[in-house]
Image (spheres, rainbow, N blue to C red):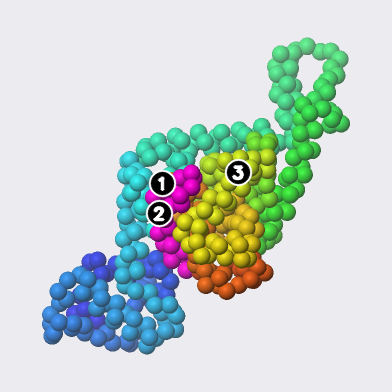
């Protein structure tokens, strides 16, 4: 019916891809019985002939064509809002999203990944689906090397190391003893296969005795970690309770919680000074979610091992924030909170004075959680994934951009904060409202560096 009425240039055709729902909301793909999809027009609906420059003429430039198509598409949305959704998705947005995906796929397919280019792409937000975010995060965290040919070797070695750590540290002493006995019995049988005699009594060392209270006792260490494991289990039950991926009694949900429990318990055993701190489950959740939903089956099956390694890397430059003994050190949480206050003062002294002197609201009252948990309790999961794209892609480090985002969160609430008292403002900052994430991140990028000794990117 539409033959000959409209010829779309190749780039503009990408505004209506086969699966536009993965690029932007507002498109509703309908398939007819023959399997053909129609993402733009309904059956029986006539398509107007577009003649922006007069009868039979074409637009003078690509920009003019995109503008023409955008106006045409928005008029169709207004006439049929049920089909296209309430939000207007511009042709430029769809083309930009498609171009970004293409650029990212091209970059990740190179033998040598250009990390600077990857950082620039990720800073603007990584596309959902296709495992692109999972691969990009692994590269940005340094888990994957920039040389693509080394990926398989590195992944295999790291995943095997994780399995070995689990066998050594997560098995109960009784399981370890059973395995040792099986190996010992097997060796004895091979050595004395033809020798008859009385059964030998196995001696149990003091370290292997379940009632031993010595610090070197494996059972003493095991009972100590049981309490940590129970705390982790309780926290995981509260992790994103609105998402079936994390919460619920389904086998799928229990499997995910068990994997996260292994990661957090193993981290606690390998870091006896810090152990497990409540809230680490929230920091782990976005990473495990991204890795385990990778459409690549092998990557998804190894999400636990990959998440552990990347979780350790993620906390490497902020681990001091979780250690109370280091609160007053140069890398401690109190020093970081002080840097946040200085950054706010350098960018908006009026707001800084209002919070600091009029309200007497110290950063410890609200930003402690923001910083230690990387904002994971301030926003829902999808906004967190977007924010982390920018945090992980910052060439000056996660903490640099994290402080900028925290400062931007204050600036975006300036009018409400200046008119609020202590109670109202504290409640606002401890229950941060929904905001436009792209605007928030742009405010963070535009901040001036503070004048303290703490180095922020220029």
Q: Position of residue 84 (x, y in %)?
A: 41, 79
Q: Nearer the viewer, residue 311 or 333?
A: 333
- Residue at left 83%, top 20%? 203
The image shows residue 246, relative to residue 51, as above or below, that is: above
Residue to which mark 2 is pinned = 122
CA distance separating discs 2 and 3: 29 Å
Q: Earlier in the sequence, mark 2 or mark 3?
A: 2
Mark in the foreground, 1 or 2 = 1
State how far apart marks 1 and 2 are (Cα): 11 Å
The image quadrant that residue 37 belongs to is bottom left
Label 3 and label 1: CA atoms lie apart by 22 Å
Indicate left or right for 81 with 52 as reference. Answer: right
Give the residue number, with chain letter if any, for mark 1: 395
Left or right, residue 312 beside residue 121: right
Identify the residue position indicated by label 3 in the image: 332
Find out whether residue 111 is within the magenta segment: no
Q: Is disc 2 surrounded by few (<14), some (14 to 19) or many (20+) residues within 10 Å?
A: many
Q: Secondary structure at mark 2?
A: helix
Q: In the image, which is nearer the foreground, mark 3 or mark 1?
A: 3
SS for callout 3: loop
SS for dot 1: loop
Q: Residue at x 56, y 57 (%)?
A: 375
The answer to whether any part of residue 179 appears in the image is: yes
- Residue drawn where x is 57% and y is 74% of the image: 419
Q: Residue 195, percent across and down?
A: 78, 11
Q: Is residue 389 visible?
A: no
Q: Magenta segment range?
A: 436-458
């Amino acid at each position: 019916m539409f033959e000959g009425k409209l010829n779309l240039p190749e780039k503009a055709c990408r505004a209506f891809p086969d699966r536009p729902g993965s690029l932007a909301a507002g498109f509703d793909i309908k398939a007819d019985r023959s399997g053909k999809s129609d993402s733009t027009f309904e059956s029986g609906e006539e398509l107007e002939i577009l003649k922006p420059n007069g009868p039979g003429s074409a637009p003078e430039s690509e920009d003019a064509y995109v503008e023409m198509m955008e106006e045409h598409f928005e008029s169709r949305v207004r006439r049929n809002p049920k089909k296209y959704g309430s939000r207007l998705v511009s042709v430029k947005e769809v083309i930009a999203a498609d171009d970004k995906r293409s650029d990212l796929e091209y970059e990740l397919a190179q033998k040598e990944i250009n990390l600077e280019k990857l950082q620039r792409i990720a800073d603007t937000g990584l596309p959902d689906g296709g495992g692109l975010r999972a691969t990009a995060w692994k590269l940005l965290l340094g888990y994957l090397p920039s040389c693509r040919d080394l990926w398989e070797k590195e992944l295999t070695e790291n995943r095997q190391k994780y399995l070995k750590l689990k066998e050594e540290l997560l098995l109960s002493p009784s399981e370890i003893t059973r395995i040792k006995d099986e190996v010992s019995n097997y060796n004895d049988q091979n050595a004395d296969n033809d020798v008859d005699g009385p059964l030998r009594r196995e001696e149990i060392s003091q370290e292997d005795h379940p009632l031993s209270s010595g610090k070197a006792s494996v059972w003493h260490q095991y009972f100590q970690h049981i309490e940590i494991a129970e705390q982790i289990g309780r926290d995981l039950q509260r992790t994103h309770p609105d998402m079936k991926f994390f919460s619920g009694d389904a086998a799928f949900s229990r499997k995910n919680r068990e994997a996260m429990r292994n990661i957090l318990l193993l981290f606690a055993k390998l870091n006896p000074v810090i152990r497990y701190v409540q809230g680490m489950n929230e920091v782990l959740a976005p990473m495990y979610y991204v890795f385990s939903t990778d459409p690549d089956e092998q990557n998804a099956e190894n999400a636990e091992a990959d998440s552990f390694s990347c979780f350790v890397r993620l906390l490497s430059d902020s681990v001091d924030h979780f250690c109370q003994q280091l609160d007053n050190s140069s890398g401690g949480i109190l020093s970081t909170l002080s840097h946040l206050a200085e950054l706010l003062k350098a960018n908006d002294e009026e707001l800084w004075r209002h919070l600091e002197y009029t309200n007497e609201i110290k950063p410890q009252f609200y930003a402690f959680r923001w910083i230690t948990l990387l904002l994971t309790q301030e926003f829902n999961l999808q906004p967190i994934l977007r924010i982390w794209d920018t945090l992980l892609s910052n060439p000056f480090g996660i903490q640099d951009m994290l402080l900028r985002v925290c400062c931007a969160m204050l600036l975006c609430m300036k009018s409400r904060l200046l008119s609020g008292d202590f109670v109202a403002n504290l409640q606002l900052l401890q229950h941060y409202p929904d905001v436009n994430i792209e605007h928030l991140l742009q405010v963070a990028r535009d901040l001036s560096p503070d004048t303290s000794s703490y180095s922020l990117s220029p």
